[in-house]
Image (tube, rainbow, N blue to C red):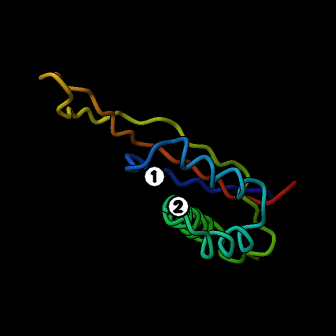
Amino acid sequence: MLQESKCKMKFIRQSPYKVRFVLDAVRGKKVNHALDFLDFSNKKAAKFISKALNSALSNYAQKNEDFDSELLYVKEAYVDEGPKIKRFRPAAMGRATRILKRTSHLTVVVGEKG
């Protein structure tokens, strides 16, 4: 019986565009290969994705007593936009410009291919 496990990380303080850049490289790979790739990646988003992937793997281990991590793949991985934190910065001639600090919601699904 094929099962899958999911992990959601919300309110990541990085824009979805930047997280998606690293996530596209991991999607569809074996879990062990994905974790190795993320460990050596030089991106801030890699730390968040690695944390979520380890959590999904742990969730899978809770459901299934005996499982082989070599058979597990990153089935789904997507990032959605979270709420924007709005700030203002002084600009020329007494004006103020708005700064949007973007956040992300990351979802990772791990399972066996079937």
Residue 67 falls in image quadrant: bottom right
Amino acid identity at mark 1? Met
Residue 44 in picture, x, y percent from top left: 48, 62
**The image quarter in which residue 97 lies:** top left
- Along the line of sight, the residue nearer the viewer: 57 or 79: 79
The reply to whether callout 2 and callout 1 are in contact (CB within 8 Å) is yes
Mark 2: amino acid: Ala
In the rendered image, which quarter contains the C terminus? bottom right
Give 106 or 103, whichever is nearer the viewer. Answer: 103
Q: Position of residue 110 (x, y in %)?
A: 68, 58
- The residue lying at 61 percent from left, 67 percent from top is 57
Residue in front for this viewpoint, 85 or 96: 96
Mark 2 to mark 1 CA distance (whole Å): 7 Å
Helix, strand or loop status at disc 2: helix
Closer to the chain start, of discs 2 and 1, is 1
Residue that mark 1 sits on: 9
User: Which residue is label 2 attached to?
Assistant: 52
Residue at point 70%, 67% (across, down)? 34
Q: Is residue 10 above or below residue 29?
A: above
Quarter the N terminus occupies: bottom right
Q: Return the mark for residue 70.
A: none
Most foreground residue, 103 or 111: 103
